[in-house]
Image (spheres, rainbow, N blue to C red):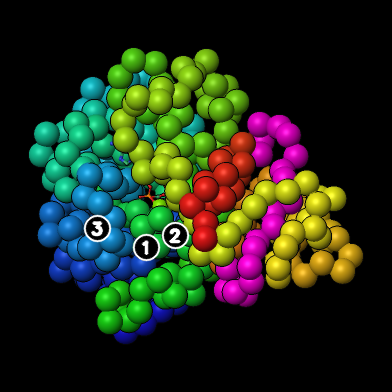
Amino acid sequence: MSTLHPTPEAIALAVAALRRGECIGLPTETVYGLAADARNPEAVRRVFALKGRPADHPLIVHLPSRHFLGPFARDIPDHAWALAEHFWPGPLTLVLAREFDVPTEVTGGQDTIAVRVPAHPVAQAVLHAFNGGLAAPSANRFGRISPTTAVHVRAEFDESVLPIILDGGPCEVGIESTIVDCSGGSPRILRPGMIDRAAIEDVIGPLADADPAGPRVPGALEKHYAPRTPLVLLPRAALGDGPGRGRVLAIGELPLGLPGLSLPADPTGYARGLYAALRSLDAARVDEIRVEQLPPGADWDAIRDRLHRAAAGSG
Ligand code: TXA
Ligand code: MG
């Protein structure tokens, strides 16, 4: 068993493993997930153990479609249904009041549950064949960079601990889903993503501002998405200045004579390539990763969020 092309046979193997309570590596359009049967407490505990994730940090349950919400969430408000109808399948996670019999392992003991319907065709195929909910955090060790290819997942978990990874190619979106809390009061964004505030407000009207005392979101920890190499954000003109050996992550063209990588100058292309670029710069074992500061503007906000956390947690 190993990294599998997502043939019908491989998908059947993956679903059989999930039914036995095993974890699999699953592609989604945002990042790869480490998926397990959301109804099987032992399987969910294994996800936490593999990731090294504290037990009180809840997981997102992935569903085949919004028609599967019933057994997981209750008292679903109209604005949550509107978001589900508009953005699912897609990179949006909703936090809702949880149904009473959802294993507490999944929700980290909270009375809410995070749910999303992923758009990736392989995730869709697995979920429909499984015909239920899959708890799936990003398939990285706790606090590290999320994986956006099957090779990244294999670098985190070898075959002895994760026999099956479905290879769905590089992730289209590249950073984790937007999380909107619809569990009570006015909805608000808990984690920014490529579905931005304006797109959400177009569907349901003005959102409340984030509440710093709200539910615990590990994505909201300062240190997260972090390379081992110290990472600093610098204006373009200063990218060549730092001490020691550095590698640059530039926007558009790489400045002449500087070693490193560049990403597209549009947020969609930049997000898609970001985690692979950070992984490869991290692997270069230099003294510093020097990331060009992002342009202003709300369409860069989700990427800005990930880079600030990467800087805070790096080294
Ligand atoms: O794009 C994504 O969302 C990816 C793919 C695999 O779907 N998943 C992902 O999962 O990013 P993870 O576990 O790395 O992040 C899940 C986030 C965490 O920040 C967690 O705190 C939050 O969702 N979360 C889960 N349940 C919650 C709840 N009941 N209330 C508030 N936040 C919750
Ligand atoms: Mg994660």
Q: 198 and 84: which one is in front?
A: 198
**Residue 215 place in picture, x, y as percent:** 31, 30
Residue 127 circle label: none
- Closer mark to the observer between disc 3 and disc 2: 2
- Whether ligand 2 has any atom under 8 Å from the Cβ at mark 2 is answered as no
Looking at the image, the residue that sits furthest to the left is 101
Q: Considering only vertical position in the picture, is 231 above or below 23?
A: above
Secondary structure beneath label 3? helix
| Kind of residue at disc 3 | Phe
For mark 2, what is the residue? 144
Residue 48 circle label: 3
| Kind of residue at disc 1 | Arg
In the picture, residue 44 is in which quadrant?
Answer: bottom left
Q: Is 134 on the left or on the right of 293, as rendered? A: left
Q: Considering only vertical position in the picture, is 256 above or below 114?
A: below
Q: Which residues are magenta?
A: 280-300
**Residue 14 place in picture, x, y as percent:** 29, 70
Q: Is residue 299 magenta?
A: yes
Q: Is 71 on the left or on the right of 25, as rendered? A: left
Q: Report if residue 8 is visible in the image.
A: no
Q: Report if residue 224 is visible in the image.
A: yes
Looking at the image, the residue that sits furthest to the right is 256
The answer to whether the residue labelled 3 contacts the one labelled 1, judged by CB atoms less than 8 Å apart, is no
| Kind of residue at disc 2 | Arg
For mark 1, what is the residue? 141
x 28%, y 45%: residue: 57
Q: Is 229 on the left or on the right of 250, as rendered? A: left
The residue carrying pointer 3 sits among few (fewer than 14), some (14 to 19) or many (20 or more) residues within 10 Å by Cα, namely many
Q: Is residue 251 magenta?
A: no
